[in-house]
Image: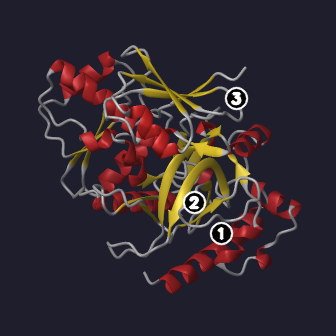
Amino acid sequence: MPLEQLRALQGERLREAVERAYKAGGFFYRRMRDHGVSPSDVTSVDDVRALPTFRKEDLRANEAEYPPIGDYRVVGLSGSVRLATSSGTTGRPTVTVWTDHDLNIDYEIAARRYWREGVRPGHVIANAHPGYLNGGQSQVAGAAEKMGCLPISIGPPEDEALVERALRTIENIPIDHWHTLPAGAARIREVAERIGWSGRMPEVAAVTPMRQYSAISAGLECIGTLGGTCSPENYRGAHVAEDYAIVEAVDDVTGEPVPDGQRGKFLCTSLGRDNPMLRFDLNEVIRLDRSPCPCGETHVRAFWEGRMQDVVTVQGKWIMPIDVWSEMDESQEFAVVRTADEQDSLEVRVENPAGGLLERLQERTGVPVTVTAVEVGSLPRAAYKANRVVDERP
C-alpha cells in the first residue's frame, strides 16, 4: 500500500478508535478527560502523540477496581467469543477477551507472518505455546486453522519428561513448521537429540539470537502478532501490520520519538478493532526502520530488543541480553548480572565460554566486560520466555 494511502487509513482508523473508546465512558474516556484530550483533538495519525499512554499495571488496577475484567474495553463479556489471560511474565496475568471481529483481525495479521515464513494451506504446524487460560496456544492454533493448516499443540517444554512424551507422540507425523519461542526451541532440540528423535526438530535458526527480530508482538491485550519478517534468513526486522496499528519508539524520559535505528520504548495503538487500545506502553524496547525494504513492502520494520526490565545500564549505555547473545554459539547458555542501577562494567556468566568471547563482547558493547565460566547445566532453562538477567543489586 502506498505510504500516503496507508497514513490516511491509519488516520481514519485512529479517529474511529478514539471516538469509540471515548464514547464508551470507561478507562480510556477517564484518561483522556484527565489529560484534557477529546476526540476533536485527533485529526491525523500524528495526533496519536496527544493521547496519554498506559501500562499493564494500569490494566491490572482497572480490573481490580471494575471486576471481573475491568472497563477498558468497549465490548464486554456478553459480546465476546473468547477469553484468555496474558503470560504473566511481568506480574499478575491480565484478562483478555475477543469479539469475533477482533479475533479475525488477529488471525489475518498472523497469517501474513506465517505466509512470509513459508507456511501454506495443508501444512502441519507444531505449536509449543502455553494453553489452558493462556491465550498463546489458541491464537497460534486458530490462525493456522484459518489458513487451512493442521496445528498440533504440545504445550511449553516445562521439563524433559513432558518434552519427551510430546515428541514420541508426534514422531511419525510429518511436521512442516515449528512455532515456539527461542528458549523453548532450544530445550526441544536438546531433548530430541538426547533421545535420538527421528522427527523434524525446530530449525537451528529458531534458537539463534537474531531470531527475535523475525517477529513482534504487542501483547495479547493489544495485538498478539503485530508483524513478521519478509526474510527469515536475513533478519531485516518484522514488517508491522500498520493498517491495524500505530507503532512508536519513544525516549524513556521525554516521551518524544527517537530517530529510526535508535532504541526506544515501545508504544502501540490498535486500529480497526471493536476493542481499541490507545498508546499501550509495553515497557519493552524496539528499533524502527522506515527505509525501503528490498522485498517492496512499505510497512515499517520493527526490531524487538527486549524488555525494559532487562536493560542493564553500564557507563550510561543500555546493554540488553541480545547484545550478549548475538556473540554466543547457539548452544551456549548465559546470564547477565545486574549489580547496581549504574554499573562500571558488564558481568556475564556463561556455560562453557568459547575462546575470544570477552574481546567480542567488549567490541560489541563498547564497555568493559567480565566473563565468568560456570558449570554446564547450572543456568536455568526456560520453557517459554527466557529471563537472562540476574539481579544481584544490594
Figure check: 161 above or below 144 = above
Q: Nearer the viewer, residue 67 or 251?
A: 251
Q: Nearer the viewer, residue 352 or 190?
A: 352
Residue in view at x 13 percent, y 40 percent: 174
Q: How crowded is mark 2: few (under 14 residues within 10 Å), some or many (20 or more)?
A: some
Q: Provide the secondary structure element on which disc 3 rests.
A: loop
Amino acid type of the residue that numbered disc 2 sits on in the rendered structure: Gln
Residue drawn 14% across the image and 22% down it: 196
- Residue bearing the label numbered 1: 17
Q: Is residue 267 left or right of residue 193?
A: right
Q: Earlier in the sequence, mark 2 or mark 3?
A: 2
- Looking at numbered disc 1 in the image, what kind of residue is underneath it? Ala
- Specify the quadrant that holds the C terminus: top right
Nearer the camera: disc 2 or disc 1: 2
Find residue 51 and report its image quarter. bottom right
In this view, the residue in front, 82 or 143, is 143
Residue 317, given in percent of the width and then of the height, sits at 63, 46
Q: Can residue 56 be seen in this view?
A: yes
Q: Cα distance, mark 2 to mark 1?
A: 29 Å
Q: Which of marks 1 and 3 is in front?
A: 3
- Name the quarter where the N terminus is drawn: bottom left
Q: x%, y% of residue 128?
A: 35, 35
At x 31%, y 56%, the residue is 114
Label 3 sits on residue: 340
